[in-house]
Amino acid sequence: MPTFDLYATDPGDPHWQVPATGAARFSWEYDDGRDRLLALYQKGKDKQWDGQKRIDWELEVDPADPLGTPDESMSLYGTKHWAKLTEKDKGELRQHYASWQFSQFLHGEQGAMVCAARIVESVPDLDAKFYSATQVMDEARHAEIYGRFLHEKIGMLYPINDNLQSLLGDTLRDSRWDMPYLGMQVLIEGLALAAFGMIRDTTDKPLPKQILAYVMQDEARHVAFGRMALRDYYKQLSDAELREREEFVIEGCWLMRDRLRGVEVLENFGIPTAEAEEYSEQSEFLALFRQLLFSRIVPCVKDIGLWGKRLQQAYVDMGVFEMGDSNLDLLMAQDEEIAEKLDAERFAAEEHDRVAEVQEAIDRGTP
């Protein structure tokens, strides 16, 4: 079925065109590079995988409860509207919320693919071009997987959120070669990693858990790439240049904070925008969710050298300043381990089933 037939609301023009700015840069030095970045490039090649084969698409998903979402996690819970909902209505609400969340993941992954391609084009160093070329393939795979999950298992999509689209546009329109790194690798990817991780760690549904764990294994490398490249580059910038980038981060973080409120879902259920925004702001679950979403961004921003007073104050205002002390390397290592453990458990179970089938065949053939 065409995607446009599955959108919960009209997405508008089927194509969004962002004018390209900046220069394409070639490098004629083919035998020099940073060892850490070349090692990451090698890992990027080694860790390529096929979403058609690694993920068990035969697993069933109930569209009315695709993620095992508790009632308390929905911003409508406890309001006058919640009491009027039937069980069927609540199932539809869960479907819409899951569709909205994974649709933003899908649109973000397409944005990441375009930004990674822009990095290949514009970054001056060949080692960075090599790695970002592997990331383009990673992001294509992620978009393919999220698209398939929404089409085949949820049966519904939502248009791109205005705030996500705004940050993507700002990132792609900027002519400075480091801005796709900062906008995508640090802000959008960092936020996505935290959102993926919260769902991965709370869902009791095996298919979305697989998808998120395997995607996060890739994304951990992408954030490491952004940190590595920007940390080196930002050491060379003037205070004025660093402040410009801090302003971009501040604006982007406010946009990202407001991106994940799900107001569009409530509007689709007939709730006025102002009321929907109020419910989203008052939800204790969403308040915690928004705070935890910055667990990957704040330490990364601090690590790459953007930590001026104005930026620190913005994080105080958002209530996420203390996230700057999070151990980003530990979080990334855990993402790798969870995916590997999930693989090991799945393959062990499949091997057990194969052995049981063989034994059953032997037993049936015994006189």
Image: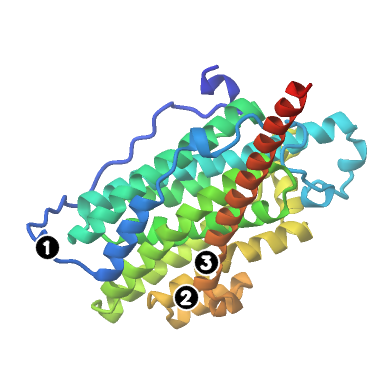
Question: What's under tag 2, amino acid-wise?
Answer: Leu
Q: Is residue 13 left or right of residue 85?
A: left
Place of residue 318 in the rendered image (x, y in percent of width and height, measured from the top left): 60, 70
Write the residue at 51% across / 65% down: 332
Observer able to see residue 157: no
Q: Is residue 223 above or below residue 78?
A: below
Q: Is residue 3 left or right of residue 117?
A: right
Write the residue at 64% across / 36% down: 99
Front position in the image: 188 or 65:
65
Write the residue at 75% across / 47% down: 204
Place of residue 174 in the rendered image (x, y in percent of width and height, measured from the top left): 29, 54
Q: What secondary structure is found at the residue carrying circle 2? A: helix
Q: In this view, does 300 lie to the left or right of 211?
A: left
Q: In this view, does 49 lie above or below 222?
A: above
Question: What's under tag 3, amino acid-wise?
Answer: Ala
Of the residues tagged 1 and 2, which is closer to the observer? 1
Front position in the image: 146 or 130:
130
Q: What secondary structure is found at the residue carrying circle 1? A: loop
Q: How far, Cα to Cα, is label 3 from label 1?
A: 30 Å
Which numbered dot is residue 333? 3
Q: In this view, does 192 lie above or below 139?
A: below
First in sequence, mark 2 or 3: give its number. 2
Place of residue 313 in the rendered image (x, y in percent of width and height, measured from the top left): 53, 78
Q: Mark 1 points at which residue?
A: 31
Which of the 4 image quarters holds residue 222?
Answer: bottom left
Q: Name the residue under label 2.
A: 311
